Amino acid sequence: MVPGMALSTGDTIPDLEVTTMGPEGPTKVRTTDLLGTGKVVLFAVPGAFTPGCSKTHLPGFVERGSELKDKGVDTLACIAVNDVFVMDAWGREHGVGDDIVMLADGSAEFTEAMGLTRDMTGFGMGKRSQRYAAVIEDGVITQLEIDEGAIDKSTCSNILSLL
């Protein structure tokens, strides 16, 4: 991959550590261990608790996640450049339970490796992720939908239409 270029269909997901909240507290997980087997839908948001992410993006996956499972999705995961405590609190507020794995990419390493960072310093948010959704099969990206403005390509409804 060329530095600064986004990964695309046919590329393998990066193998890096991210964090999720486990029963004993923050738990490091390797992206290939969590996202590299079976059919996975990974969706990324610029920030937990931000308006579009909280009103539209995450709720769509909470409400219709079972439809993804019905279409053969083994793992549904949400990632953001936030800390694990924020991601855990946001997931609890939206009732994700065990249906969606909430992943913290606190230092944006996974986001950078995906080539999907977004400079949001103008909003006081620093380096964040672009909003996207990826369908990953056995570690290989088979669909990658990146929103350019409105939340449309990366919605659960759109991903369902592509499966």
Image (cartoon, grey):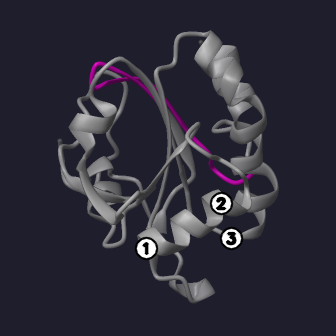
Region rendered in magenta: 135-150
Residue 161: quadrant of the picture = top right
Quadrant holding the N terminus: top left
Label 2: few (<14), some or many (≥20) within 10 Å?
few
The residue to which callout 2 is attached is 92
Where residue 89 appears, x then y in whole percent? 60, 69
Q: Secondary structure at mark 1?
A: loop
Q: Is residue 95 magenta?
A: no
The residue to which callout 3 is attached is 49
Question: Measured along the vertical axis of the image, is residue 103 above or below residue 153?
Answer: below
The residue to which callout 1 is attached is 83
Compare residues 135 and 112 and report the one nearer the observer. Answer: 135
- Amino acid identity at mark 2: Arg
- Amino acid identity at mark 3: Phe
Residue 151's mark?
A: none
Q: Earlier in the sequence, mark 1 or mark 3?
A: 3
- Amino acid identity at mark 1: Asp
Q: Earlier in the sequence, mark 2 or mark 1?
A: 1
Residue 50: quadrant of the picture = bottom right
